[in-house]
Image (cartoon, grey):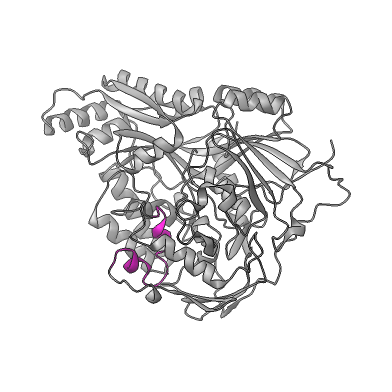
Amino acid sequence: MKKSKSLLLLLALVLVIGTVLAGCGGNNSGNTANTGNTANTGNTANTGDTAGEEKLAADQTLRINLSAEPPTFDPAQAQDSQANTVLKTMYEGLTRMNDETGKEEPGIAEKWDISADGLVYTFHLRDAVWSNGDPVTSEDFVRAWKRVLDPNTDPTAPYAYQLYYLKNAEEYYTKKITDFSQVGVKAVDEKTLEVTLKAPTPYFLGLLSFYTYYPVHKSVEGNDKWATSKDTMIVNGPFTLTEWTTGQSLQVTKNDKYWNKDAIKLSTINFSLVNSGATELLSYKNGELDFAGAPTGEIPQEQIPIVSKELPNEFNRKGIASVYYYEFNVTEKPFSNAKIRKALAMSINRQALIDNVTLGGQLPAFGFVPPGIAGADGEYRNAVKDSYFTEDVEQAKTLLAEGLKEEGLDKLPTFTLSYNTSEGHKKIALAIADMWKNSLGVDVQTVNQEWAVFIDNRQNLNYQVARAGWTADYNDPMTFLDMWVTGGGNNDTGYANPEYDKLINDAKASSDMAKRQELFAAAEKLMIEQDMILMPIYYYTSNSLTKEYLKGVTHDFSGAIDLTRGYLLEH
């Protein structure tokens, strides 16, 4: 088990290596642009050649488990790590991330130019085609981004705000303007895309590899059900969706029309859909899976210390830029009272939870932005105040009493703690409910919900307290903090604070890294120390098992996985 200091060193090392984009919120989810006038990273991406004398297995079928079925395969509607894992096999954006180098590299864009002021990006598209043979054009990106920003979509895109970096994108989404041609994206010609930003964004190239920025084929127009069937999904990535049995399995198969098909060694990826960590681990040990554990599945928490010793050459643990937390529905009494929320956050023992329940070497969290996220001078978490509150049962009792008095209550009513189906989430919920009972004398009903139902309930504020996790989408504090602005697509707490909104907007408008860090620190302090809209619990580690014959599968700094360049050796 890694000590805290060792984990921080590991995260710092990952940061030094580079910055990477990842999938986001889910079961568990910035890059520095060239500052010169031209950013041309080459005409071809990494070919993904296998090393030396390694001999590939005849059967290049990768077997992996997803602990939950992705709620959608529409890039505009996706918002979880399971969808990210599968969408990454089927689509490619203007750029893609090379997890080994930690840098963005050409994807559908063969090269690009950046204006001297950092506001205008001109992307030159390569001769790539869709899985049906149609050319991938600049208009496919305009179409996709317009879908994300369309304020009349039902439901609206949860990640619409991720495109607010574009000039007039927010104004279009909020209906301040109605003409999409005023938004900063334009198809100059079939193979040239011009993007204009509202302010210089140092991690924009990395952000373009995120699924919300993927292109979509023209066939999606007028077909609301296009992403619900493998027969209507036309994609541009390394694999195509070839089998989909709801609730049981998914299969993607190598796309021979992918522009860089020679870099793809796998012929097929078979995904089972099993939400039992015990079953997943047994399948792995029986040779039925080639990979098990985070971020796609789960190793039972009590088994982590055992398998790390039993299978030392296959067990992997790394610190990742991801946070596990409980969030409060601040629109519903009594959780509209910040003192009650603070009391609950202060009355649990995080280290005891890690040592006795999660068993994965996690770090206790007293802030929201995790270690490993870039700051003005090194790592953000090390540069700002490390803790915004302390664990203090006596102070928690005082705050609870004050909050109840303000609400006209003698006792906190029994409330519901919701979590999505997972043995690990269940154990954590039961342990925390027990801590609350022993520390504060409050009664909690824990409720398990299937993933899609759980997400829908959170989005619609149909909960009281719910578990959540957030993984970095890019390497900048903004990826953790802009989600809490008023009306944000991933703001599932109902939090609305104009002071917080201003801090985030000012940070987005500034290119001064030191100033941005001051604004971020003030925003984080506001939403935790003052308002406590969520209860940080721990910063994740990723614990997984990989067969020694499986190579080329990579994890980025946030823990997101890229299966596309994997390959299997003879064994």
The image quadrant where one finds the C terminus is: top right
Residue sitting at x 16%, y 31%: 402
**Residue 264 position in % (x across, y down):** 74, 54
- Is residue 329 shown above or below 121? above
Q: Is residue 53 visible?
A: yes
Q: Is residue 413 left or right of residue 265?
A: left
Q: Is residue 422 left or right of residue 496?
A: right
Q: Which residues are magenta?
A: 157-175
* Residue 161 drawn in magenta: yes
Q: Using the image as rendered, state which of residue 300 and residue 179 is in the foreground.
A: 179
**Residue 295 position in % (x across, y down):** 57, 39
- Is residue 107 shown above or below 371? below
**Residue 174 position in % (x across, y down):** 30, 63
* Residue 568 drawn in magenta: no
The image quadrant where one finds the N terminus is: top right
Q: Is residue 553 left or right of residue 74?
A: right
Q: Is residue 458 left or right of residue 92?
A: left
Residue sitting at x 40%, y 36%: 453
- Farthest residue in the right direction? 53
**Residue 447 position in % (x across, y down):** 37, 25
Q: Using the image as rendered, state which of residue 173 and residue 320 is in the foreground.
A: 173
Q: Is residue 31 visible?
A: no
- Farthest residue in the left direction? 408
Residue 196 quadrant: bottom left
- Is residue 309 shown above or below 406? above
